[in-house]
Image: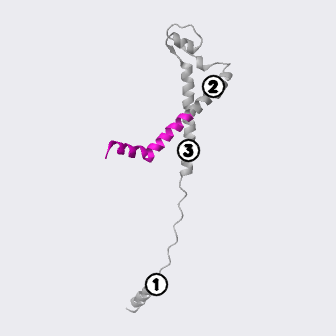
């Protein structure tokens, strides 16, 4: 089997295609969650904590005096813990949403309760006759 034939078989298997679709949708979903956190949740959290902008929270490691993270990064190393908080929040929200989705999918996949066993089939007439003959012979003998 040639290399291209093997590759074609590998690439056309259902699992590979499903994985590719999952990665693409996951990437897009990650962007949606990122936007949700950056554009909706973090401004609300910032408002609750008195107008704090977490994205600009950093510790200068090279003696920078800038107050904006992007400018401080141009001047040297910084410990951007505000960005880290935002990324952790992104992860927690994404993990929670995926948990809820998997839980719902599992709930839908649960098997229906097993049906009660069918009542036993009636005994065939010839078997009933043979039993009666047997019983009659046992009474005689």
The mark closer to the camera, 3 or 1, is: 3
Q: Which residue is mark 2?
A: 42
Q: Which residues are magenta?
A: 1-29
Give how far across and how far down residue 29 sits, in percent: 56, 35
Residue 61 versus residue 97 in the image, above or below: above
Q: Residue at x 63, y 25 (%)?
A: 42
Residue 96 lies in the magenta stretch: no
Give how far across and how far down residue 4 sits, in percent: 36, 42
Of 141 and 52, nearer the camera is 52
Mark 3 → mark 1, Cα distance in angstroms: 54 Å
In the image, is 89 to the left or to the right of 18? right
Secondary structure category for the residue under label 3: helix
Q: Residues within 10 Å of mark 1 (few under 14, many from 20)?
A: few
Q: Residue furthest left?
A: 1
Mark 3 → mark 2, Cα distance in angstroms: 27 Å
> Between disc 3 and disc 2, whose residue precedes?
2
Of 86 and 31, nearer the camera is 31
Q: Which residue is mark 1?
A: 128
**Residue 65, numbered label:** none
Q: Residues within 10 Å of mark 3 (few under 14, many from 20)?
A: few
Q: Residue at x 43, y 46 (%)?
A: 12
Q: Which residue is mark 3?
A: 103
Of 139 and 108, nearer the camera is 108
Residue 23 lies in the magenta stretch: yes
Q: Residue furthest bottom?
A: 140
Q: Main secondary structure of the magenta part?
A: helix
Residue 129 versus residue 37 in the image, above or below: below
Give how far across and how far down residue 75 sits, in percent: 52, 9
Quadrant, the C terminus: bottom left
């Amino acid at each position: 089997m040639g290399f291209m034939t093997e590759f074609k078989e590998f690439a056309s298997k259902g699992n590979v295609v499903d994985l590719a679709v999952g990665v693409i949708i996951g990437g897009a979903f990650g962007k949606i969650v990122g936007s949700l956190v950056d554009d909706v949740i973090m401004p609300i959290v910032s408002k609750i904590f008195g107008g704090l902008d977490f994205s600009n929270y950093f510790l200068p490691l090279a003696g920078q005096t800038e107050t904006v993270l992007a400018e401080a990064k141009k001047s040297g190393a910084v410990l951007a813990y505000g960005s880290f908080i935002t990324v952790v929040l992104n992860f927690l929200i994404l993990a929670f949403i995926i948990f809820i989705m998997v839980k719902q999918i599992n709930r839908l996949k649960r098997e229906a309760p097993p049906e009660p066993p069918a009542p036993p089939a009636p005994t065939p007439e010839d078997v009933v006759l043979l039993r009666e003959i047997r019983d009659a012979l046992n009474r005689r003998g």
